Image (cartoon, grey):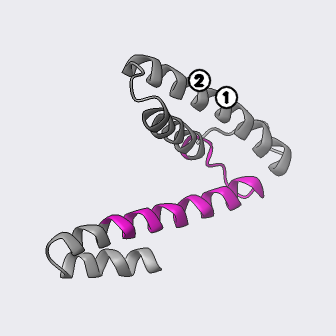
Amino acid sequence: MAGIILLVAGFAVRGHRGTIMIGAGLALATIGGLELSVREHFTGYRSHTALLAGAAAIIVLVGLSLLAPGLPLIVALLLALVAFGASARFLVRTFQRRSGLSFKFR
């Protein structure tokens, strides 16, 4: 809810402060949506494999850009792809155990 409030307030406030508020609102709303996806996925209610694996890949990309800025882009993308695949496999198996379904990749 705080993310939505910051987004609306950021559009109402102009200038640098509004830009910061919009960025903070987007970050909070993203974290809130990701938290809901994690809860639904790990309880077996609904599969969010692609979303959660994509979040893992983005975390790897951001981490590599901060920790190894001289790393070639293709290497960073390949490592993110590996992270996506490994986390997707883990997430599918976890969802299968929790829900009792045979396979569901969404």
Residue 82 numbered mark, or none = 2
Q: Nearer the viewer, residue 75 or 95?
A: 75
- Image x and y of residue 80, in percent: 52, 28
Q: Which residue is mark 1?
A: 86
Measured along the vertical axis of the image, is residue 30 above or below residue 49? below
Is 100 on the left-hand or right-hand side of 7? Answer: right
Residue that sits furthest to the left in the current view? 15
Q: Nearer the viewer, residue 49 or 58?
A: 58
- The boundaries of the magenta stretch are 23-51
Q: Nearer the viewer, residue 22 or 84?
A: 22
Q: Residues within 10 Å of mark 2 (few under 14, many from 20)?
A: some
Task: Name the residue at 29% across, 68% down.
Answer: 20
Is 16 on the left-hand or right-hand side of 36? Answer: left
Measured along the vertical axis of the image, is residue 2 above or below residue 28? below
Measured along the vertical axis of the image, is residue 47 above or below residue 43? above
Measured along the vertical axis of the image, is residue 27 above or below residue 73? below
- Image x and y of residue 32, in percent: 54, 67
Is disc 1 placed on a helix, strand or loop? helix
The image quarter in which residue 3 lies = bottom left
CB contact under 8 Å: marks 1 and 2: yes
Task: Name the residue at 78% across, 58% down.
Answer: 43
3 magenta-colored: no
Amino acid type for the residue under numbered disc 2: Val
41 magenta-colored: yes
Is disc 2 placed on a helix, strand or loop? helix
Residue 29 numbered mark, or none = none
| Most common SS among magenta residues | helix
Task: Name the residue at 61% across, 49% down.
Answer: 48
